[in-house]
Image: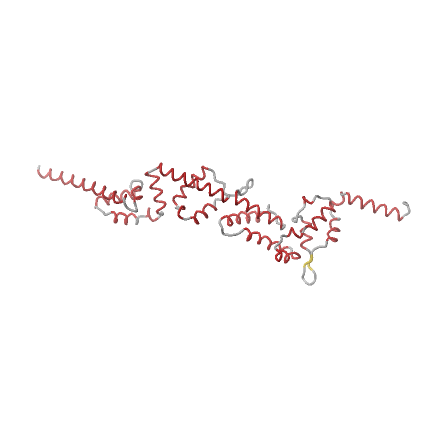
Amino acid sequence: MAEKEEDEKTQKEKKEEKKDNKDRLESALMNSEYSWAAGLIYSNDRIKELFKTAIKEGWTPARFIAQFKDTGYYKNHTEAWLKTEALKKTKPAAYRDEKLKAAAKIRDDAASMGVKVSEKQAFKMADRYLRMDFASNQNAYSDWLAKRVASTDEEGFLGAAGEVEEDLRGALARNGFSTDSQTWSDWVDQSVRRIVQGNMKVTDATDYVRRTAAGRYPPFGQKMLDEGKDLQDYAQGYISMMSEVLEIPEANLSVSDPKVMAAMTGKQNDKGDYTATSLYDFEKELRKDSRWRTTKNANVTAQATANSILQSFGFMG
């Protein structure tokens, strides 16, 4: 009988000891820099078993933390990720509040960067914002957010990114490049992202376009680089001539017209130098165009030629 009572007393003492160990360990954790770890104890089986062992063997908080940090669960995640997970598991309302704050910031920052983000998208992105601790790493946050800049055929970029896109597409058009080209379209998308991220300036991109055009139009290349002008700035004479001869409104013509481009490309002489087509020769080329035959100019010229022939035969006084 006495032996049984002694055994029951021992069991009771052990139970109380385990409870004391549990309370002591939990209290120590909650008052340490690893207070968030307490929130993970019952949300992860591996940590739960580790905690049971710590209680059973009477580990100190320092030993528990050391063993916890040696687990794959800890090693495979950042502390910011673990803290967010603990908050999500133990205080869902507080976790939601933090996500709402992060989502609002994401939407505000996205608008200034030209990123279109809906409330639903921002709320989803907010979890990663918290887990990556972007609040403490502005550069990483800016890069992460900038990568979410998305372009569609219908809308293109928005906000500040939209203004950059407009600048780049304008530079391409002024230098005879088609923005419908997949190559240039991809270049615009990549350049906008780099500029928004702060890795490149708009002038770097527009200078690249100008240098590329300068290489394709030797007669004007050096001038373009020396004067910092676009191909369009040297094309007006050809555009005006084409408008006059083919009777096409100037607004419907540009430096990217094949005839204008051909004239500005010029021809290479024996010395290897390139010379642009003169306006006189350009006009002659335009009169060979099938469109010229339907113009008033062509009719007047044809009538004048006919009258001249008749006069030569004495049919007109």
User: Residue 210: where, in percent of width, then height?
Assistant: 60, 53
User: Residue 25: where, in percent of width, then height?
Assistant: 24, 44
User: Residue 147: where, in percent of width, then height?
Assistant: 48, 46
Q: At 65% from the left edge and 51% from the top edge, which residue is drawn? A: 233
Q: At 50% from the left edge and 41% from the top edge, which residue is drawn? A: 116
Q: At 69% from the left edge and 45% from the top edge, which residue is drawn? A: 250
Q: Residue furthest bottom?
A: 271
Q: Is residue 202 above or below residue 90?
A: below
Image-based side of 154 in relation to 76, left or right: right
> Colour scheme in the image?
secondary structure
Specify the quadrant of the image occupied by residue 90. Answer: top left
User: Residue 92: where, in percent of width, then height?
Assistant: 35, 37
What count of labels does the image hold? 0
Specify the quadrant of the image occupied by residue 268. Answer: bottom right
Specify the quadrant of the image occupied by residue 272. Answer: bottom right
Q: Is residue 181 above or below residue 121?
A: below
Quarter of the picture holding the C terminus: top right
Q: Residue furthest left?
A: 2
Quarter of the picture holding the N terminus: top left
Q: Is residue 212 above or below residue 5?
A: below
Image-based side of 135 in relation to 302, left or right: left
Image-based side of 288 in relation to 109, left or right: right
